[in-house]
Image: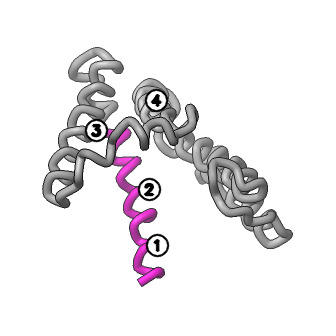
Amino acid sequence: MRNLLLLIPLLVGMGVVIQSGANTQLRAILGNPFLAAFISFGTGLLALLILNTVMGTDPSILNAENIQRTRWWMWLGGILGAFFITSVIFIAPIIGPTKLFGIIIASQLIFSVAVDHFGWLGFEVQAINIKKAIGVILLIAGAFLVQWGKSS
């Protein structure tokens, strides 16, 4: 079952590329990147409302007590999501999805290793070791070769 769960990030990765193309084309039709991002988040909100209704989520979970237990940075997810989507809408048509996502993936890998190593954001500490360091370096090198390698 655990190995089956690894398919989800694979699908998410493909979905992000499709999302960037869909949102970029929406921007081209509408002529407004912020409206395209708004529509993207609006359809996502609608999908989550339907999912929570189907799953029978109890809305009373979102109460004052639970909200007070949160920390300020826990509310950044939506803002960072909006920043991500809008940035992709702006940048993808200029540099292309391969270069864009190569840079994003390299950044995610480097920051993820730091988050794991120090246990930031509530994650369990998973110290960096030589195998992880080599793996990250190889993935970044691969992304670099895909991005800037000259085609024959």
Residue marked by disc 3: 22
Q: How far apart are marks 2 and 1 (CA)?
A: 11 Å
- Type of amino acid under label 4: Ile
Task: Indicate which disc, 1 or 3, sits on the residue closer to the N terminus.
Answer: 1
Q: Distance between the residues labelled 3 and 2?
A: 14 Å
- Type of amino acid under label 1: Leu
Q: How far apart are marks 1 and 3 (CA)?
A: 25 Å
Task: Indicate which disc, 4 or 1, sits on the residue closer to the N terminus.
Answer: 1
Q: Distance between the residues labelled 2 and 4?
A: 20 Å
- Type of amino acid under label 2: Gly
Position of residue 147 measured from the top left corner of the image (x, y, whole percent): 61, 46
One can see residue 149 in this view: no
Considering the numbered disc 4 on the image, is that residue within a helix, a strand or a loop?
A: helix
In this rendering, the label closer to the viewer, 4 or 3: 4
Residue 23 quadrant: top left
Label 2: how many residues lie within 10 Å, few (<14), some (14-19) or many (20+)? few
